[in-house]
Image (cartoon, rainbow, N blue to C red):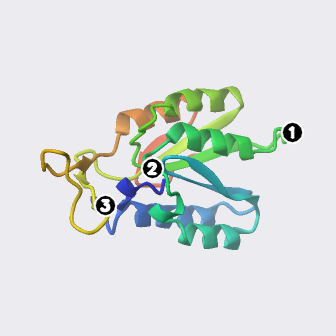
Amino acid sequence: DVSRSMMVADVKPNRLERARREVADLMRVVTGDRIGLVAFAGNAFLLCPLTLDYGAVDMFLSQMTPEAIPTSGTDLGGAIETAIASFDKESTADKVIILVTDGEDNEGKGLAAAKKAAEAGVKIFVFGMGDPSGGPLPGEEGGYQQDDTGKMILSRLDETGLSDIAQAAGGEFRVGVAPAVL
């Protein structure tokens, strides 16, 4: 998730940087497994197809910013569907999506996509980035974003929605830490 809400600093230094660190830690553990990378905000893009070249994945990971996807918002369904499409349908290897997000599903299609993943034999493990009480959304030109009434906009971790996605696809949900079972 490279949406602007991932720049909220309710986890240090911010959600996106914490997510990068979690994925980098995961890559040190998963030797011999192919890894790919899907960047998403208002739409999703396969940034790095499945590969054993962890250095390439790390290079793309370090370049993930909110500017990587120009469409604002968060489309969890699109991200999941893009990840599903990246798998070799003929392969008998386990297929797992690690979804790293704060869970703000602006399109509301995440759960339906998780059910499609389960039907395709793909499990989804979710790293939830952020705090359920939330934090102020940074503005595009400094300061914090405000609504039409001048009230500061808060972005919150959606634990319920992310847990539902993980359960629908036979995975697990964890707040800010790597899932224990892959």
Q: Position of residue 33 (x, y in %)?
A: 73, 57
Amino acid carrying label 3: it is Val
Q: CA distance from mark 2 to mark 1?
A: 29 Å
Badge nearest the viewer, 2 or 3: 2
Of residue 104 and residue 142, the one placed in the foreground of this image is 142
Q: In the rendered view, does 159 fall on the left or right side of 70?
A: left
Which quadrant of the structure image shows residue 94? Answer: top right
Q: How many marks?
A: 3
Label 2's element?
strand
- Tell me if I can see residue 182 in this picture: no
| Of callouts 2 and 1, the N-terminal one | 1
Look at the numbered disc 3 and give the secondary structure of its residue.
loop
Distance between the Cα atoms at labels 2 and 3? Answer: 13 Å
What residue did someone put label 2 on?
101
What's the CA distance linking mark 1 and mark 3?
Answer: 40 Å
| Residue 82 visible somewhere in the drawing | yes
Where is residue 137 shown, x and y percent of the image?
27, 56
Instruction: Name the residue rendered at 67%, 36% in the picture.
Output: 122
Residue type at tag 1: Glu
Residue 182 has which mark? none
Residue 3 x/y as whole percent: 43, 54
Outermost residue on the front side: it is 148
Label 1–label 3 contact, CB within 8 A: no
Residue position marked by numbered label 3 in the rendering: 11
Residue at 68% from the left image edge and 56% from the top image edge: 36
Provide the residue designation for mark 1: 90
Horizontal and vertical percent position of residue 16? 42, 62
